[in-house]
Image (cartoon, grey):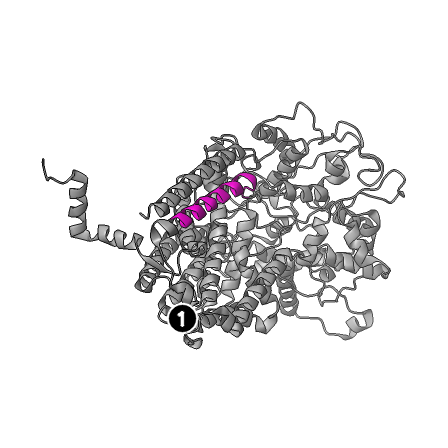
Amino acid sequence: MSDKKPILDTVKDWVNERTGLITFFSEFLHEEIPGGTRFSYTLGSACMFLLTMQIISGIWQLFYYVPTVDYAYSSLNYLRLQVPFGWLIHGIHYWGGTLFTIIVGLHCLRVFIWGSYKKPREMVWLIGIVLIILTALFMFTGPVLPWDKDGFFAGQVGIGIAGSVPIVGPLTQAILQGANKMGQMALLRMYVLHVAILPGAIAAFVMLHLIAFRAYGESGPWDEKKRKVVGYFWPEQIFKDVVVTFLIFLLLVYLSAFFPAPFSGLADPADTLVSPKPAWTFLFLYQIIKYFPGPLEPVGVAGVPLMIILLFASLPFVDKSPEKNPFKRGFVVLCGFAFVGVVLYLTWLGYIYRSDAELAQMEPPQHMDSSASDNAKITLSERYTAMVAANADKHATGEQLFKTLGCTECHTVSGGASNKQGPDLLMAKGNNRTREWLYTQIIAPQKHNPGTIMPPFAHLSEQNVNLLVDYLQSLTPKETPAAVAPAPAAAAAAPAAAPADIGAASIKNGEQLFTSMGCVQCHTIKGRTSNKAGPDLIMAIKKDKPAKDWLKTQLVNPQAHNPTSIMPSFGSRLNDQQMSDMVDFLSSLSTREAAALPPGEKEEAPETPAPAGGSGGGVQATGVIGNAEHGAILFHQSCIMCHGPHGNPKTPGFTGFMNGAPKGVPSLNPIDRNVFNADPQTFVEHIDQFLQKGAPNPEAGGPSMPDFGASHALTQAQIADLEAYILSLNGVDRTMIVNPGIEPKEFFYMLAAITTVIIMLAALYWFMMKLLKI
């Protein structure tokens, strides 16, 4: 009989002699656990499992993800809707990040309650704090990568918060954003951080954490009697870890199948309906900053987070008592729970926060029945505006509406220069607009300027529109030297102004207009390259040396020079004197020197500007999965007065646009059968042409369909949202999974059955091992 060892044992011995791995794992599996095994000890293993799932699902997504502003959103949507089991891969990564953050927090809380941060495990605790910070950074960079509305604004707010940190803030913002606005550079840097730098850092610190933990093992219970009970990692703790791991995986699949990640729509910087917020993990900090306004803001931005980190890091060195029983460490434990409670409360406050403008736009629509008065209209925010306007003076009510509807987001009423998107209304009052002009400007601004980005407020009742007009007409403009002529007597007595003085005053007024009219949103006047949508005007005017007549035409009708220009017309927004001042100012730029580059700042490389239609160069609405809820708000802003509530112009009590029922306006709910299609993509392509190019009304006197796309009244992202809403009205889901592999809910039920069987077999095996004392 041969004494020769089996080949497998020979290989194991050979490997063990050279690496010691077999001995290491044997000792690891048979390690004693003071106090016995517990399910509370599975939190560390759960963190490791979720981190592994994040790595696997993240790498899988990289095979499809394209890190550009044009294709990031659509490439992930392709994975989710077109690739078999893509919904599962993305869902596991989306929900895995949330669960990982929660379980890391629970693991930290368990260590705190058990007193496991005390000597000699201080290093385990300190490395754990670093891992919590890295987890937060993952949750900061990850949401930006889909380049959807939620992620875009979360990143914008997060980078803004980081940029406001004293001393290092501007450098941090420059590193994260790469330009002076969120764009391709910001997306690429978030991508590199998320998929390369942070994974390497967390892998290194996880290894250090495990090494430090292995040095002293589990601290065990605080009761010395219970510590005398000894358990073993194999098979007792392993069994509990396996059970928890399977349950977590089952939960991930359940969330992916029944609560998939939202399709919030393509990132759209021009969108005013979104309330910008950071990722949920930073909502508590977002809320804290509100309590430190103005000069105190650095305290909230930097002081509070730094204090929290230092407080946690110093805990093992401040709480030096060897006592671990939480009931004998009442003050410390109560402080810990109070901290958790405050963070949760602030997170909730940040989650439910809505700006006044957003509340006005989110108020659900209501309509009056046939017995309503003649002035009753379908409105979006009547209940909300009535609340602030009740029992108020007529002018005060108009002013309250002006603030409530978010007009202050784009306009000032100071009478001076402003850097907001729209003109200062006290300065614009010099145009002497009629009441009819103001009424039309409020409900249909595109009639005055097809290129305007001002949203229509056709959803307001006639009474509220009139109140706004009253308020605008009640404004008293501040007089400027260029706008007011002196009295005849004073003019006779005063010496004639020198031409140079007149020119200087005109240029100064023109520069103020340049700022207050929102030109700074698209142009710089620095004399060097810029990544804004329009050219730097010092460079452009020095190069082309345009005549004043050319400049005036450019301001009145920019499409006369470039038919594809997205620059809006200022012909109806400036009076003759203001137009002359603006032209004088622009002409003066030909002699202005370039602004000096600040020390240490590099000249920005121009970033490809986003077109008016969307956030990326070649994005079209038909290739974008829009957000139906967002589309509903847009519909009630721009379409309800013609198409009726929920797309049905025959709704009882609906009187249409201004007076009488709308003529020749088709129903969108249900839509014409020749337009309808059960396939979401085909359906979208059918209705897109009407939203992009408009359509004439077949009946005389009826309103025509506006060309929302061609006139740039809506961005392509907004049109995609509208299309998603119209599809939802007709029972078609824009987010329908085309190729699921296995239907998500069926897959979950199958996995639940398999998991149950596996856990039962594992329990039987564990019981037999205990019974046989193996």
In this view, the residue in front, 217 or 568, is: 217
In this view, the residue in front, 87 or 103, is: 103
Q: Is residue 258 magenta?
A: yes
Residue found at x 41% / y 62%: 602
Name the side, left or right, on which 622 lies relative to 416: left
Residue found at x 42% / y 72%: 316
The spot of residue 290 in percent (x, y) is 61, 66
Q: Which amino acid does the dot numbered 1 rest on?
A: Lys
Residue 178 visible in image: no
Q: Is residue 361 magenta?
A: no
Q: Is residue 304 above or below residue 625?
A: below
| Residue highlighted by disc 1 | 118
Q: Is residue 246 above or below residue 33?
A: above
Determine crowd level at label 1: few under 14, some 14-19, many 20+ residues with C-alpha closer than 10 A: many
The spot of residue 238 in percent (x, y) is 37, 49
Magenta stretch: give its range: 239-261
Residue 372 falls in image quadrant: top right
Locate the N terminus and report the quarter of the image it occupies: top left
In this view, the residue in front, 352 or 70, is: 352
Residue found at x 78% / y 44%: 366
Name the side, left or right, on which 191 lies relative to 636: left
